[in-house]
Amino acid sequence: MASLGLNMDEQKAVDRFRKDVVEPSMKKLVVLDFYADWCGPCKALTPLLEKVVGEYGAKGVVLRKIDVDAEQFIAAQFQVRSIPTVYAMFQGQPVADLTPARSESQLRAALDQLLAQLPVQAGAETAEGPSVEELAQFVAMGEQVLADGDAQRAVSIFNQVIDMAADHAPAHAGLIRALIAAGQPEVARAALDVALADPALAAHPLVIAARSAVDLASRRVDDGELAALRSRAEQHPDDAEARYAYAEAAFAAGDRDEAADQLLHLVAHSPDWNEGAARKRLLQIFEAVGLEDPWVVANRRRLSRLLFG
């Protein structure tokens, strides 16, 4: 892609594209997905691309996504007229239009044909495994999918990363939290046990936080118990212990908004109760849910305003 006569923003876009797409494509087959957040068909196609490309990772195939709203100059260079548009890139050049491949079988057939024709360097990738950058990309994708509320698809993505790198702590931690979000606490406990069997994983801060998530999710509260604890907290608004017990029950029942409200009330009005138990529990919940989760970000701001405002 030429760089003469470009303004500063266009040059930055070209530099990003070279680093993220062109450079990896010199040895690998890059599946380049042009999409937008508002595009319904794009959202339908994304799980297919993630699944199939993840399966072909050891063969030297990687996925790169281009947001057409954020990267209008790049999209214009490829003459993208509609989305989703998907190309295969090799050695800096488009080698196939994969847009018509809308099923797993069609996409696999197209990739198999390209891999048979092109000198993609899969051998080194299979021996050495995916790069740190590639693993980080997949984990970030899984975290975003989880934050968007599709826990089951996040489970699939994190499992793919673990298949590629069994000792990757962020993927194990993400898998555990995704399983909890998907309503599978027993499976999450089993996934945690797998991680804890590896001393290096067990000592990783993300896995430790995931362990807290499993502990929090292990409690079960029926409607009667929750109602009784709510009634006690309402009847005794100055009883910090009652409010704290209700907050924990609310979180266990899946009402994290109510849990946060109750714990933040304790931080505001009884900050020293039980050696700051309310603040500590909030921080534990934030770690368990995931520090990048929008809900956590919003409630961390609320906590910060109480502590420092």
Image: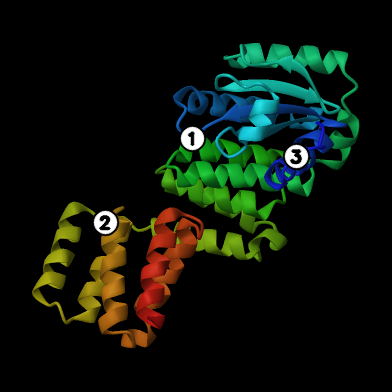
Going from N to C along the chain, the mark reached first, 1 or 3, is: 3
Name the front one of labels 2 and 1.
1
Residue 165, visible in the rendered structure: no
Where residue 74 appears, as percent x and y from the top left, is 68, 32
Residue 143, visible in the rendered structure: yes
Where residue 123 appears, as percent x and y from the top left, is 90, 31
| Marks 3 and 2, how far apart at CA | 61 Å
Q: In this view, does 136 lie to the left or right of 95?
A: left
Where residue 226 appears, as percent x and y from the top left, is 19, 59
From the viewer's side, name the closer residue of 185 and 14. 14
Question: Judging from the image, what secondary structure is the residue with disc 2 in?
Answer: loop
Residue in the image at 56% along x and 50% along y = 174
Q: Quick check: marks 3 and 2 in contact, CB under 8 Å?
A: no
Q: Quick check: marks 1 and 3 in contact, CB under 8 Å?
A: no
Name the front one of labels 1 and 3.
3
Going from N to C along the chain, the mark reached first, 2 or 1, is: 1
| Marks 2 and 1, how far apart at CA | 37 Å
Question: Judging from the image, what secondary structure is the residue with disc 1 in?
Answer: loop
Tell me which amino acid carries mark 3. Leu
Going from N to C along the chain, the mark reached first, 3 or 2, is: 3
| Marks 1 and 3, how far apart at CA | 27 Å
In which quadrant is the N terminus drawn? top right
Q: Mark 3 points at which residue?
A: 6
Q: Mark 2 points at which residue?
A: 221
* Quarter of the rendering containing residue 30: top right
From the viewer's side, name the closer residue of 4 and 249. 4
Q: What numbered label is drawn on residue 37?
A: 1
* Quarter of the rendering containing residue 102: top right
* Quarter of the rendering containing residue 244: bottom left
